[in-house]
Image (tube, coloured by chain):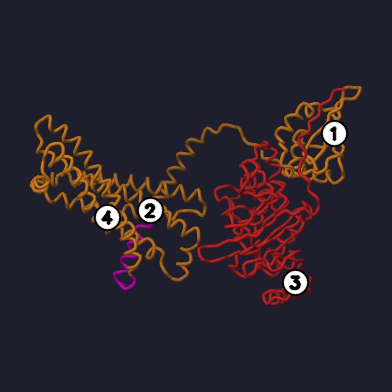
Chain colours: A red, B orange
Amino acid sequence: MSKDFIQTRAGDNSPSQEIICDVQNVCTEFDDNIVHHNLNLKVKHGDITALVGRSGCGKTTLLRHIIGLTKPKSGNVLLFGENLHTMERVAQRRLMNRFGVLFQQGALFSALSVFDNIAFPLRELKQFDETIIYQLVMHKLALVELEPRDANLLPAEISGGMVKRVGLARALALEPELLVLDEPTAGLDPDRSHNFIDLVKQLKKSLGLTVLFVTHDMDTLASLAERVAVLEDKHIIADCPLRELAEIDHPFIINFFQSIRSRLERL
Amino acid sequence: MAAASFYVAQDDQGRHHVQLFGQWSLRAPSNDFAKLKKSLQPLFADTFTKWDLLAVEQLDAAGASTLLSGWGNKLDDNISLRPEHTALFNTLIGLAKPPTKKTECDWFAPFVGIGKGVLHILHHFIEFTRLLFSLLIEIAYLFRHPQDFPWREFSANVFKSGVNALPVTALLGFMIGVVMGYLMSKQLHTFGADIYIVNILGLSIIRELGPVLMAVLVAGRSGSAMTAQIGVMRVTDEIDALTTMGISRILRIVLPKVLGLTFVAPLLVLWTSGWTLAGGAFASNMELGISFRFFFDYLPLVVEPINLTLSLIKGLMFGFVVALVACHFGLRIKPNTESLSNSTTSSVVTAISGVILVNAGFAILTRGIGV
């Protein structure tokens, strides 16, 4: 009997209600303008959380803090229990591979084809040869319901809806646990945005994702969000399941809930 | 949950039984599929190996694809899978295969390449001529409707490509003047022909160096900026927005740039030549002891004033060429970063080559004047 046993060190524990993203006492200022003051937000594993608030209230800024693009003036942002800004480089990169981001305009690399855009993060890992990468890219394309022949197109040659799908496929390439979407349905017609929401929901179910997104679109909010975090007056005034908003007495939320009530009833 | 791992046992007939454990997915941060594939390679090569994936905790497309590539992209009886994993494997097997590349040598490729290159240049030439004539038509239009002249854009371009270029042209001109003056003084001094420094510097700087130096600097500075600006305006649909407001893009974007630079270039030539001469005078003063007063008194006696006119005409032409080439390449930019960088490079290279070409032609035409 010959034995050959490879055991790499045990991975992280992930109980079902682990806190994926923890924003603690974040303050942000731009010159004299205070955007966030002692803001707290927690996103739990498996949630689909929507971040809402009026235009210019700092939603996208908060999202950029969470994904580590910017650093708050004070306070901490913990992703998977770790602070992106205090880690050493290799660990930071690993942590960044655990979430995928879909930017508002897709942010596809304009000089690369659809195929190369999706293959980019996979190639950067340097773990796969080209045949495996090809198969994985085709798999991601199929996940977001695009045809294999779309793979050779350049970002400038495809429609807005397709740009979002390719962006989503790229965000999903490394099998992230957390998916961050900035205005996922902005610029899509109602039909397309409906399909896109269905796609995200279905992917969330099949891949076991946690989703955090920012939106202004009430239809997207009503049909996608399970929880909603309301950013108003420099901090989160409510973080609860969508329907519980009705019980909160705050002028902004009352106003806001009225506009989604009819949509919720339709569902 | 644990990282991906495997266990190999051997039965009586010498067959390997491989049992896989843990997370065969990218989510386990310590997984390295390249290493796993390498250590599994001898087992993949043995067709009798039995594979047992029943104890795998998590399997994603990356893990499945790695295993599939080892198994020759098919499932067989030696592989035992959980039902939910079978579906993933079958999806992956059903995907499109990578296209097989043609390795055949194409003997006509170089000729096709040359032909394409010629057509490409021809296309550029046609487009450039078209742009030139649309510009002339717009100028003709402006003669009938002088109130439509874009004064604001014109003066903005004069300021950006003229006034803002003053410090850099002065500095570079002065330094080149010092270097040339120093080297020439050394040579002339050995022949005792000190006084001719004024002739040589005066003629070469006023007639040739000043205008060409100005053109090269302006092509690098303002030409590239113009190309990039028009390119980004195209990418962000600003040019289309202008057109829908009934404003001609040639009139509003190309014309102010071309006229602005054509207007300001002769002035820049004067400025650059002046500083280059000052540099030359400084070097001759240090090396040969020729006083500034004498240098500039003697200059008009040995360099015919017609040379100054020629240099101003050159300035006009160079400014026109640089701006028009910049606009031509700017308008051809496609909405991606690669095209933007290529066009900006081509714009500067073509503008400088064009300037040198025009300069050579002009030198031949005016060979009998002023020397």
Q: Position of residue B154 (x, y in %)?
A: 33, 64
Whichever of callouts 2 and 4 sits on the residue coming sooner in the sequence is 4
Q: Are marks 4 and 3 in contact (CB under 8 Å)?
A: no
- Disc 2 and disc 4 on one polypeptide chain: yes
- Which chain letter goes with mark 4? B
| Helix, strand or loop status at disc 3 | helix
Is B364 on the left or on the right of B301, as rendered? right
- Disc 4 and disc 3 on one polypeptide chain: no
Provide the residue designation for mark 4.
B265
Secondary structure that dominates the magenta span: helix
Q: Amino acid at mark 2?
A: Ala
Which corner quadrant of the image does residue A246 belong to?
bottom right
| Quarter the C terminus of chain B occupies | top left
Residue B326 has which mark? 2
Q: Are marks 2 and 4 in contact (CB under 8 Å)?
A: no
Q: Are marks 2 and 3 in contact (CB under 8 Å)?
A: no
Q: Nearer the viewer, residue B205 or A124?
A: A124
The range drawn in magenta is: B130-148
- Which chain letter goes with mark 1? B
Q: Is residue B127 visible?
A: no
From the viewer's perspective, is residue B363 above or below residue B5?
Answer: below
Cα–Cα span, label 4 and label 1: 78 Å
Cα–Cα span, label 2 and label 4: 15 Å
- Disc 1 and disc 3 on one polypeptide chain: no
| Quarter the N terminus of chain B occupies | top right
Residue A245 has which mark? 3
Q: Position of residue A227 (x, y in %)?
A: 75, 64
Decide: few, some or many residues near mark 2? Use Cα within 10 Å; few <14, some 14-19, many ≥20: many
Cα–Cα span, label 2 and label 3: 57 Å
Provide the residue designation for mark 1.
B19
Measuring 18% from the left and 40% from the top, which residue is drawn there?
B283
Q: Position of residue B119 (x, y in %)?
A: 44, 46
